[in-house]
Amino acid sequence: MGPTLCVSISLPITVNTYQLRVRLSLLYASVYLHYGFSTPFLPVWFSYKGASSQQIGILLSVPMFLKILIVVPIANMADRLQRVRDILWITTAAAVLFVVTLSFADRFWALLAIFTAFSLVWDPMPVLVDAYAITASRAKGLAIGQLRTFGSLAFIAFTLLGGRLLDRIGPARIIWWCASALAIPLLTIPLLPQDRVFAVATSKAVGSWRDLLRDRALLALMTGVALLIASHSIINNFSSIQWLGEGLSGNFVGMLWGVAMASEVFVLWYSQRWLKGRPPIILAFMGALAALLRWCAMALHPTAMFLPLLQALQGISGMAPILAVMIQVERGVPSGLTATAQGANAVIVGAAVALSTLASGFLWRTFGTGAYGFMALLALLGLLILWVGSRGGHQEAVGAPGFERFSA
């Protein structure tokens, strides 16, 4: 089985642009499918296994902190070897094995040890997916946002399906559904060409992640966007608790999150058509302004009739900044540093979100809806960093021909 498997993931594959678009869409859908089940329901399985609330918090924080340590080295290795696709397959296969092993753990320390090993290979997966898709999109002129849409749709679909499955199968089998969904990309990844075929001749010299540190404008974009994403911690962690506590129905709360998800899909699908040749930092600026408006309004404790309008801003405040970084990496970072750049971005975002999440509980207990005012300050800081970064240009250290400035 081993030799056959090695051959199956290294066969040369030639596809036209349409076929590549379809297969990249399948890649995003298959990878993000399992997040739609594991994100809401893995904590339920930990509870079923006897983990306390505090222990569940520890378990769920492991991927967040490991991401800071291991994503960049793995992404840089994939860049240096020009084997992003193959390393994605290997990390996915290892993740499936660890999830299966996790099902046999009964004590907290066993759960922690196995889940930590799982996180080491699980954390790089979305980074490698984005890196491959960005490299392919750059070479074939595809819209990365539209490809990413299918990941969001798969996430939404499996989240809705997951609730019904849980009612039918109970918490004991959650882990097996997670493993099954996680195994699906093992079938779609081999359908893709080797990422090295997309590398342009000028990008053969693969640099180090340290080269990216010399590009202060790119780091400013990543940092500003990370703060914008981190400013969503209060609404992500406590809004449903607040709304249900105020007497809103579960169906209405679900509708509010459905509006937010739909707005993200809309932004992913149409933003690049609107952006065209404009600097992608425009999307980040729009996200910062939308976040400021949203958090200031939420701090005023709006009535239920205004909540759908505020949730509709999620696509601009949350997804547009993420897409800004992806498009800038596609346009300006050499093929040999794409995965490394995505990994560095994941680290910066992970650190900002981790700190914001840790602070969110204290802020909510102390200030209630006034905590949104602190999120507005975080968004304002992100806006200022974006503005400062837009005043400068990219450094020559990264060295891609046609490397773009953020400012128009």
Image (tube, helix red, strand yellow):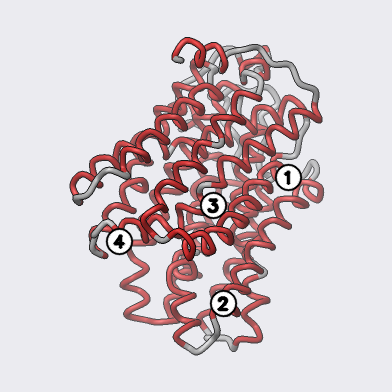
How far, Cα to Cα, is label 3 from label 2? Answer: 27 Å
Amino acid on which disc 2 is placed: Val
The percent position of residue 281, horizontal first and vertical second, equals 65, 48
| Residue beneath disc 2 | 253
How far, Cα to Cα, is label 1 from label 4? Answer: 37 Å
Q: Residues within 10 Å of mark 2 (few under 14, many from 20)?
A: some
Is 107 situated left or right of 275 in this image?
left
Question: Of the residues under marks 1 and 4, which one precedes in the sequence?
Answer: 4
Foreground disc of the pair 3, 4: 4
| Residue beneath disc 4 | 47
Q: Report helix, strand or loop for mark 4.
A: helix
Residue 146 circle label: 1
Question: Of the residues under marks 3 and 2, which one precedes in the sequence?
Answer: 3
Q: Is residue 285 in sight in this rendering?
A: yes
Q: Nearer the viewer, residue 171 or 82?
A: 171
- Residue drawn where x is 50% and y is 13% of the image: 6
| Residue beneath disc 3 | 225
